[in-house]
Amino acid sequence: MNTPDLSAFWMPFTANRYFKSHPTMVTGGQGAYFILPDGRRVYDCLSGLWCTPLGHGRPEIVAAVRAQVGELDFAPTFQVGHPKVFELAARIARWAPAGLNRVFFTNSGSEAVDSALKIALAYHHARGEAGRVRIIGRERAYHGVGIGGISAGGIAANRRVFGALSAPFVDHLPHTYDPAHMRFSRGQPVWGAHLADTLERLVALHDASTIAAVIVEPMQGSTGVIVPPVGYLERLREICTRHGILLIFDEVITGFGRLGAPFAAQRVGVTPDIVVFAKAVTNGVVPLGGMIARQDIYEALMRGPEQTIELFHGYTYSGHPLACAAGLATLEVLEKEGLIGRAAQLSQVLEDAVHSLREEPHVSDIRNFGLAAAVELGPREGQPGARGREAFARGLEAGLLLRFTADTIAVAPPFISTEEEIRDMVETLRGVLRRIV
């Protein structure tokens, strides 16, 4: 295969100059594997970007999208509807945590976060508490790249250049990762629930009457699989309830089975007021995101004359027919094949395998939760991120498409993986670690 002209495409979240002199191309995908231009198969260690738990080329999804584009390729959802958007919303509501049953569609997780934040403000405004304008995020959080998401997010590189665009009424909780107390924890660390009490300090600082919502990822994925301490999310829920603050779970990564339950909320037994989703809802085949809210949040906005638009917010492609067809097919496969239960089964296999890397060269920590794990490498002196990049390159040579952020390697394999594939992934990674400098 001839390499195409690489110059025109400005790649997202990529070192463009490095990539274009060292291109890594994929030309196909089948099951749990990507296919490279030379025909080699490499194991998809992160399910795309956390978004393809069913693997690639699922015939049910291909057929559903193909049929949909022939039947109805596009329809707006401003003032009209199409059957599949209502069908998918009802299906998602049935999967959602108890009490959350109103679904708003977007095109991505970034848009879903911004939508959730806007709806939180609109809810308080409708209830006569227009002074609740402040959002509380968390350090090291990733909530996408919209203005709301960057503002509430806590990854410095995402905020450094764009800080001038940040929303003004935002504050942040501390992150929950303390290696002194958490290194090599299996699942949720037992230390750290008290970190939620910082929210009480922020309430005292700003006054509860000014705070609209707290937004957190139940498991912080993009910053390297940061797992919530036992009791931490429960404590956040208690504080938010006491002060009338909405609790939003950003489940763009954890939604639809990654932690062995439909949503992380059910896995940890904590019900937020709003859940944000994207990625796996369509198996990554067609972009789709959204949020699920409590019915009373929806009802608070359903006031005034019946013909009045209640929320001045939405997107041209909200509930796109192709995305809805892909979403319905994805949820059907997940349910029919019991793949969320399978993800829970495979979680123990991954935990046992990945923690066997503890004594390998450069490994400073290992974390896991559900069917996700991270291996943290000690940085090379004066070259932060160099070991992560080398692990990525050597992994590709060995048949693994890894995900690295600085010196952290994250894995979140497809739910369709076999136990042998997961163990083989870890053993191959062991060999990679022994070869990096």
Image (tube, helix red, strand yellow):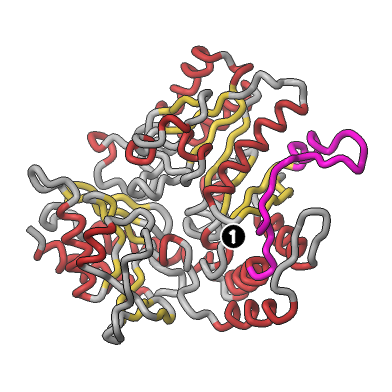
Q: How many marks?
A: 1
- In terms of image quadrants, where is residue 131? top right
Q: Give the residue type at disc 1.
A: Leu
Which quadrant does the C terminus fall into?
A: bottom left
Q: Decide whether residue 308 is among the magenta residues.
A: yes
> Is residue 413 depicted above or below 121 in this figure?
below
The residue lying at 75 percent from left, 40 percent from top is: 311
> Is residue 105 depicted above or below 62 in this figure?
above
Residue situated in front as seen by the camera: 99 or 82: 82
Which quadrant does the N terminus fall into?
A: bottom left
Task: Determine whether, in the image, residue 437 is placed left or right of residue 257.
Answer: left
Rendered location of residue 292, percent (x, y): 66, 48
Rendered location of residue 346, percent (x, y): 41, 66
How packed mark 1 is, by other alpha carbons closer than 10 Å (few <14, some 14-19, many 20 or more), is: many
As helix, strand or loop, the secondary structure at mark 1 comes to loop
Residue situated in front as seen by the camera: 3 or 35: 3
The residue lying at 49 percent from left, 80 percent from top is: 57
Rendered location of residue 12, percent (x, y): 38, 56
Residue of label 1: 288
- In terms of image quadrants, where is residue 63? bottom right
Rendered location of residue 357, percent (x, y): 20, 59
Mainly helix, strand or loop, the magenta region? Answer: loop
Residue 176 visible in image: no
Residue situated in front as seen by the camera: 28 or 189: 28
- In terms of image quadrants, where is residue 337? bottom right
Residue 31 visible in image: yes
Q: Decide whether residue 285 is among the magenta residues.
A: no
Residue span colored magenta: 295-322
The residue lying at 53 percent from left, 23 percent from top is: 169
The residue lying at 19 percent from left, 50 percent from top is: 385
